[in-house]
Amino acid sequence: MVFLSNAVSQARIDETNVNGEHHHDNVSTTVYGTRWVAEDIPRYDLPEGEMPSNVAYRLIKDDLALDGNPALNLATFVTTYMEEEAERLMAENLTKNFIDHEEYASSAEICNRCVNMIARLFNAPMHDASSEALGCSTVGSSEAIILCTLAMKRRWQLARKAKGLPTDKPNLVLSSAMQVAWHKACRYLEIESREVPCTGDVYYMDAEKAVEAVDENTIGICAILGTTYTGHYEDVKKMNDLLEAKVAKTDYDVGIHVDAASGGFVAPFVVPELEWDFRLPRVVSINVSGHKYGLTYAGIGWAIWRSPEYLPKDLIFNINYLGSEQASFTLNFSKGAAHVIAQYYVLIRLGRSGFTKIMTNLTRTADHLAECLRATGRFEILSQGNGNGLPLVAFSLKGDMHYDEFDFAAKLRERGWIVPAYTMAPDLETKKLLRVVVREDFSRSRCELLLRDMIAALKALDTLDAKAVEAHRAVKDEHSHSSLHKNPAQYTIPENGHVLNAEGEVQNLDVKQAPGIC
């Protein structure tokens, strides 16, 4: 039997097209043959018409192809790897609004379980049913920090009012190495920021100087368990003891808030004997980022208070318009439940033994990287090792060279590595350094690849003279990603190779070709 196919006439195709249809034999081209690809992607105005979903997906995907590889982004503390099961749980729960406890009671219960586990991890007192620790999930540590600072300020205000004293000059003692979230908290909540400066020998807050800065208007001291600059753990135990002695001599009631955004899920498993948490009587609240070493994707943090005494009731709102009575202490109302669920997955999936294995591996990898860099004789290591700080390596170049840490970071970027170069905290701005954050997906094998490219980057920079380095800096600054929306005329390159600026003037950069990294 012979199967015959007929050739569809153009008349029949035209007839169906007139009716707003496309004949099934009138096959479409690929996405890259459509009119949308021949036009610039919408940037400023909402387009008048629609586009097919596969076209919109591909256009955006192609734009995002220029983003860095998260696995090679050694600047961020934020988690870049989760297991497939965790990702599946997140995808299945993306439509849930966490604030709707009546509708999503199981999600609210999972949050309660997380708060219980984290409070116990931080050794919250559990002996008295009337003063149990309490906490809440947040979008990240920035929200948690603002909430905890607000609680300290309100508690101080209430105590001052009860004594008939003024409440208009609150201050908070913290390190000049604080993260920007603390600048926001102080500015937004109108609190004087009493910053204890770092020194060339000590890159974190000195406990004695911190307690010396405390007076009757101090709402609290912020101690950092893992500074952003160098990963150091501040001495919370010493701070607690000195503060206890000072409080005994005065009528001050000053507590310590611990910013454990990064170290809260590291120290308990690597140095469990370190006293920094609720074991110390002056520690009244702690924040931690689940999306950092809590091993959950970005969008989850936690705030924990020692007892209800440290979270004034007038800050808590009781609402019933979602179907049931519920308490709310947040900066934003709605947020997804997926990240809370993902955090719970990580906690029960790993347990103490799993976290211990992972954090121990990260610490060993960081120590190995630091030792290899030190052995080159070209770098000064500024971070703490052996688990006495975060699993990261902060370092700077040694010697007097014609290139600096920013040039080194730019050279590594050519190989895909994102290693941040920055300057130290206020009063030490002349100090330049780099930092490699060792996260869960940074294996020993990847560490060796980074070391190889670091050595190659040094050799490449050594071959350049000062003039070539300056030229490369000029090109990098002119064509950085922040320049995406500049006038296209700035990027016009005529046949002679000269670059024209927006006014059409020739710019002679005289850039020498640099050798490749490897």
Image (spheres, helix red, strand yellow):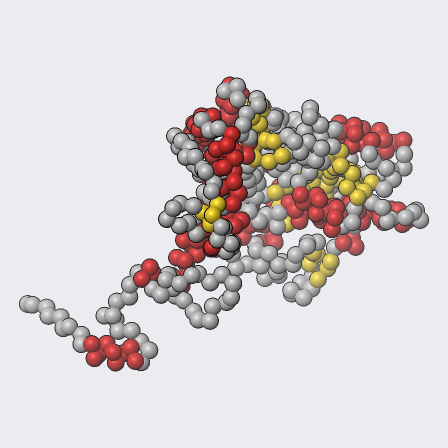
Q: Residue at x 55, y 34 (%)?
A: 406
Q: Is residue 192 left or right of residue 358?
A: right
Determine if residue 143 is in view: yes
Q: Is residue 402 above or below residue 96?
A: above
Q: Is residue 281 left or right of residue 347?
A: right
Which of these two is toward me, 49 or 361? 49
Q: Is residue 227 left or right of residue 215?
A: left
Q: Residue at x 65, y 31 (%)?
A: 430
Q: Is residue 66 above or below residue 403?
A: below
Residue 312: x %, y % from top left? 79, 50
Instruction: Tell me the quarter of the picture where residue 245 sits.
Output: top right
Q: Residue at x 47, y 68 (%)?
A: 47
Which of these two is toward me, 377 or 113? 377
Residue 73: x %, y % from top left? 50, 39
Which of these two is toward me, 460 or 438? 460
Q: Is residue 428 left or right of residue 451?
A: right
Which of these two is toward me, 263 or 118? 263
Residue 104: x %, y % from top left? 58, 58
Image quadrant in which the C terminus is located: top left
Q: How many marks?
A: 0
Residue 179: x %, y % from top left? 66, 40
Q: Residue at x 49, y 37 (%)?
A: 472
Determine if residue 353 is in view: no
Instruction: Tell me the quarter of the picture where residue 382 sits.
Output: top right
Image quadrant in which the N terminus is located: bottom left
The outermost residue toward the left is 1
